[in-house]
Image: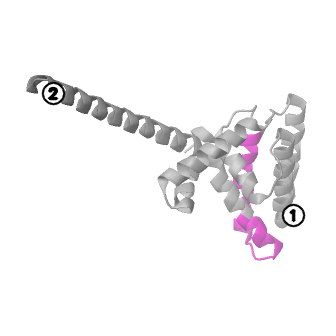
Amino acid sequence: MSTGIVLVVVVVVVAVVVAGIVAGMAVHRRRRMRLRDRFGPEYERAVEATGSRRAAEQELDARERRFADLEIRPVPGEERKRYALRWARIQEEFVDGPEAAVHDADELLAELMRDRGYPDEGYEQRLCDLSVRHGRALEQYREALEVHAMSTSGSASTEQLRGAMMHYRTLFDDLLADGEPTGAGRS
Protein backbone atom coordinates (compact mmCIF):
# COMPACT_ATOMS: atom_id res chain seq x y z
CA MET A 1 0.00 0.00 0.00
CA SER A 2 1.14 3.46 -0.76
CA THR A 3 1.77 5.99 1.96
CA GLY A 4 -1.10 8.14 0.67
CA ILE A 5 -3.63 5.32 1.06
CA VAL A 6 -2.37 4.48 4.56
CA LEU A 7 -2.60 8.13 5.50
CA VAL A 8 -6.19 8.36 4.19
CA VAL A 9 -7.18 5.19 6.09
CA VAL A 10 -5.62 6.51 9.31
CA VAL A 11 -7.37 9.88 8.93
CA VAL A 12 -10.72 8.15 8.28
CA VAL A 13 -10.28 5.85 11.30
CA VAL A 14 -9.33 8.79 13.53
CA ALA A 15 -12.31 10.80 12.25
CA VAL A 16 -14.68 7.88 12.95
CA VAL A 17 -13.26 7.44 16.46
CA VAL A 18 -13.52 11.17 17.19
CA ALA A 19 -17.08 11.27 15.84
CA GLY A 20 -17.96 8.29 18.04
CA ILE A 21 -16.51 9.99 21.12
CA VAL A 22 -18.33 13.25 20.38
CA ALA A 23 -21.61 11.38 19.79
CA GLY A 24 -21.14 9.42 23.03
CA MET A 25 -20.50 12.63 24.95
CA ALA A 26 -23.62 14.24 23.45
CA VAL A 27 -25.77 11.23 24.40
CA HIS A 28 -24.37 11.27 27.93
CA ARG A 29 -24.97 15.02 28.24
CA ARG A 30 -28.61 14.63 27.07
CA ARG A 31 -29.14 11.78 29.52
CA ARG A 32 -27.73 13.85 32.37
CA MET A 33 -29.97 16.81 31.47
CA ARG A 34 -33.02 14.54 31.24
CA LEU A 35 -32.31 13.08 34.67
CA ARG A 36 -31.69 16.54 36.16
CA ASP A 37 -34.96 17.82 34.71
CA ARG A 38 -36.93 14.79 35.84
CA PHE A 39 -35.53 14.44 39.36
CA GLY A 40 -34.85 18.09 40.20
CA PRO A 41 -32.94 18.48 43.49
CA GLU A 42 -33.05 14.71 43.92
CA TYR A 43 -30.39 14.45 41.18
CA GLU A 44 -27.82 16.35 43.26
CA ARG A 45 -28.88 14.46 46.40
CA ALA A 46 -28.16 11.18 44.58
CA VAL A 47 -24.77 12.47 43.41
CA GLU A 48 -23.89 13.42 46.97
CA ALA A 49 -25.12 10.10 48.37
CA THR A 50 -23.30 7.93 45.84
CA GLY A 51 -20.17 10.03 45.50
CA SER A 52 -20.20 10.20 41.71
CA ARG A 53 -22.39 11.36 38.87
CA ARG A 54 -22.09 8.04 37.07
CA ALA A 55 -23.26 6.05 40.12
CA ALA A 56 -26.04 8.56 40.80
CA GLU A 57 -27.26 8.34 37.21
CA GLN A 58 -27.26 4.55 37.37
CA GLU A 59 -29.26 4.75 40.62
CA LEU A 60 -31.77 7.17 39.08
CA ASP A 61 -32.09 4.99 35.98
CA ALA A 62 -32.82 2.03 38.28
CA ARG A 63 -35.51 4.08 40.03
CA GLU A 64 -37.12 4.84 36.67
CA ARG A 65 -37.08 1.15 35.68
CA ARG A 66 -38.67 0.14 39.00
CA PHE A 67 -41.26 2.90 38.69
CA ALA A 68 -42.19 1.71 35.20
CA ASP A 69 -43.23 -1.60 36.76
CA LEU A 70 -45.49 0.04 39.36
CA GLU A 71 -49.19 0.47 38.69
CA ILE A 72 -49.61 4.12 39.64
CA ARG A 73 -53.23 5.17 39.24
CA PRO A 74 -54.83 8.60 38.98
CA VAL A 75 -57.32 9.58 41.66
CA PRO A 76 -60.89 9.50 40.31
CA GLY A 77 -62.89 12.75 40.48
CA GLU A 78 -65.15 11.88 43.44
CA GLU A 79 -62.28 10.44 45.41
CA ARG A 80 -60.20 13.54 44.61
CA LYS A 81 -62.98 15.69 46.09
CA ARG A 82 -63.05 13.56 49.25
CA TYR A 83 -59.31 13.91 49.63
CA ALA A 84 -59.53 17.67 49.13
CA LEU A 85 -62.24 17.92 51.80
CA ARG A 86 -60.20 15.85 54.21
CA TRP A 87 -57.21 18.12 53.59
CA ALA A 88 -59.36 21.19 54.27
CA ARG A 89 -60.49 19.69 57.60
CA ILE A 90 -56.90 18.98 58.57
CA GLN A 91 -55.97 22.57 57.78
CA GLU A 92 -58.83 23.78 59.98
CA GLU A 93 -57.64 21.44 62.73
CA PHE A 94 -54.27 23.17 62.67
CA VAL A 95 -55.66 26.20 64.52
CA ASP A 96 -56.48 24.25 67.67
CA GLY A 97 -54.04 21.36 67.37
CA PRO A 98 -51.04 21.97 65.12
CA GLU A 99 -49.19 18.79 66.11
CA ALA A 100 -52.28 16.65 65.55
CA ALA A 101 -52.86 18.34 62.19
CA VAL A 102 -49.30 17.58 61.07
CA HIS A 103 -49.73 13.96 62.16
CA ASP A 104 -53.05 13.72 60.30
CA ALA A 105 -51.53 15.33 57.19
CA ASP A 106 -48.76 12.73 57.24
CA GLU A 107 -51.32 9.92 57.53
CA LEU A 108 -53.47 11.37 54.75
CA LEU A 109 -50.47 11.54 52.42
CA ALA A 110 -49.54 7.93 53.23
CA GLU A 111 -53.11 6.87 52.43
CA LEU A 112 -53.12 8.85 49.19
CA MET A 113 -49.81 7.27 48.16
CA ARG A 114 -51.20 3.79 48.79
CA ASP A 115 -54.39 4.61 46.87
CA ARG A 116 -52.33 5.86 43.94
CA GLY A 117 -50.41 2.55 43.91
CA TYR A 118 -47.14 3.51 45.58
CA PRO A 119 -45.96 0.45 47.52
CA ASP A 120 -45.31 0.76 51.23
CA GLU A 121 -41.91 -0.89 51.38
CA GLY A 122 -40.30 1.42 53.90
CA TYR A 123 -39.33 5.04 54.18
CA GLU A 124 -36.30 5.05 51.85
CA GLN A 125 -37.99 3.03 49.12
CA ARG A 126 -41.05 5.28 49.28
CA LEU A 127 -38.82 8.32 48.77
CA CYS A 128 -37.07 6.65 45.83
CA ASP A 129 -40.39 5.77 44.20
CA LEU A 130 -41.80 9.26 44.74
CA SER A 131 -38.64 10.86 43.34
CA VAL A 132 -39.37 9.62 39.82
CA ARG A 133 -42.51 11.74 39.40
CA HIS A 134 -42.35 14.16 42.29
CA GLY A 135 -38.65 14.98 42.57
CA ARG A 136 -39.16 18.70 43.13
CA ALA A 137 -41.84 18.20 45.80
CA LEU A 138 -39.80 15.50 47.52
CA GLU A 139 -37.37 17.90 49.19
CA GLN A 140 -40.29 19.66 50.85
CA TYR A 141 -41.76 16.31 51.87
CA ARG A 142 -38.48 15.38 53.54
CA GLU A 143 -38.56 18.66 55.48
CA ALA A 144 -42.15 17.99 56.55
CA LEU A 145 -41.17 14.52 57.74
CA GLU A 146 -38.35 16.00 59.83
CA VAL A 147 -40.74 18.41 61.52
CA HIS A 148 -43.27 15.62 62.02
CA ALA A 149 -40.57 13.60 63.82
CA MET A 150 -39.75 16.63 65.98
CA SER A 151 -43.44 17.12 66.78
CA THR A 152 -43.76 13.60 68.17
CA SER A 153 -41.30 14.59 70.88
CA GLY A 154 -42.93 17.99 71.34
CA SER A 155 -39.88 19.90 70.13
CA ALA A 156 -41.34 21.52 66.98
CA SER A 157 -42.37 25.15 67.09
CA THR A 158 -45.72 26.30 65.75
CA GLU A 159 -43.91 28.01 62.87
CA GLN A 160 -42.09 24.77 62.01
CA LEU A 161 -45.40 22.91 62.12
CA ARG A 162 -46.95 25.52 59.82
CA GLY A 163 -44.05 25.04 57.41
CA ALA A 164 -44.53 21.28 57.55
CA MET A 165 -48.18 21.69 56.60
CA MET A 166 -47.18 23.82 53.61
CA HIS A 167 -44.59 21.22 52.59
CA TYR A 168 -47.06 18.38 52.93
CA ARG A 169 -49.49 20.40 50.83
CA THR A 170 -46.99 20.60 47.97
CA LEU A 171 -46.70 16.83 47.72
CA PHE A 172 -50.44 16.39 48.39
CA ASP A 173 -51.24 18.60 45.38
CA ASP A 174 -48.75 16.69 43.22
CA LEU A 175 -50.19 13.33 44.22
CA LEU A 176 -53.76 14.46 43.82
CA ALA A 177 -53.14 15.75 40.29
CA ASP A 178 -54.58 13.47 37.65
CA GLY A 179 -51.61 11.19 37.33
CA GLU A 180 -49.26 13.93 36.19
CA PRO A 181 -46.44 15.37 38.28
CA THR A 182 -47.12 19.04 38.93
CA GLY A 183 -43.92 19.59 40.93
CA ALA A 184 -41.61 18.69 38.05
CA GLY A 185 -42.18 22.08 36.45
CA ARG A 186 -41.86 24.06 39.64
CA SER A 187 -38.71 25.82 40.70
What residue did someone put label 2 on? 6
**51, above or below 12, in the image:** below
Q: Is residue 18 left or right of residue 106?
A: left
Which is more toward the observer, 87 or 70? 70
| N-term mark: 2 or 1 | 2
Mark 2 or 1: the one toward you: 2
Q: Position of residue 130 (x, y in %)?
A: 71, 47
**68, above or below 1, in the image:** below
The residue drawn where x is 57% and y is 55% is 46
Element carrying mark 1: helix
The residue drawn where x is 87% and y is 41% is 115
Residue range of the region highlighted in magenta in the rendering = 146-175
Q: Position of residue 145 (x, y in %)?
A: 74, 62
Q: Residues within 10 Å of mark 1 (few under 14, many from 20)?
A: some
The secondary structure that most of the magenta stretch takes on is helix
Image mark for residue 100? 1
Image mark for residue 166? none
Residue 92 at least partly seen: no
Q: Say whether marks 2 and 1 touch (CB < 8 Å).
A: no
Element carrying mark 2: helix
Residue type at mark 1: give it: Ala
**54, above or below 84, in the image:** below
Residue 38 at least partly seen: yes
Q: Which image quarter is the N terminus in?
A: top left
Which is more toward the observer, 137 or 94? 137
In which quadrant of the rendered view does residue 21 lie?
A: top left
Look at the image and say whether residue 32 sits in the magenta stretch: no
In which quadrant of the rendered view does residue 154 lie?
A: bottom right
Look at the image and say whether residue 151 sits in the magenta stretch: yes
Q: Position of residue 96 (x, y in %)?
A: 87, 64
The residue drawn where x is 42% and y is 39% is 29
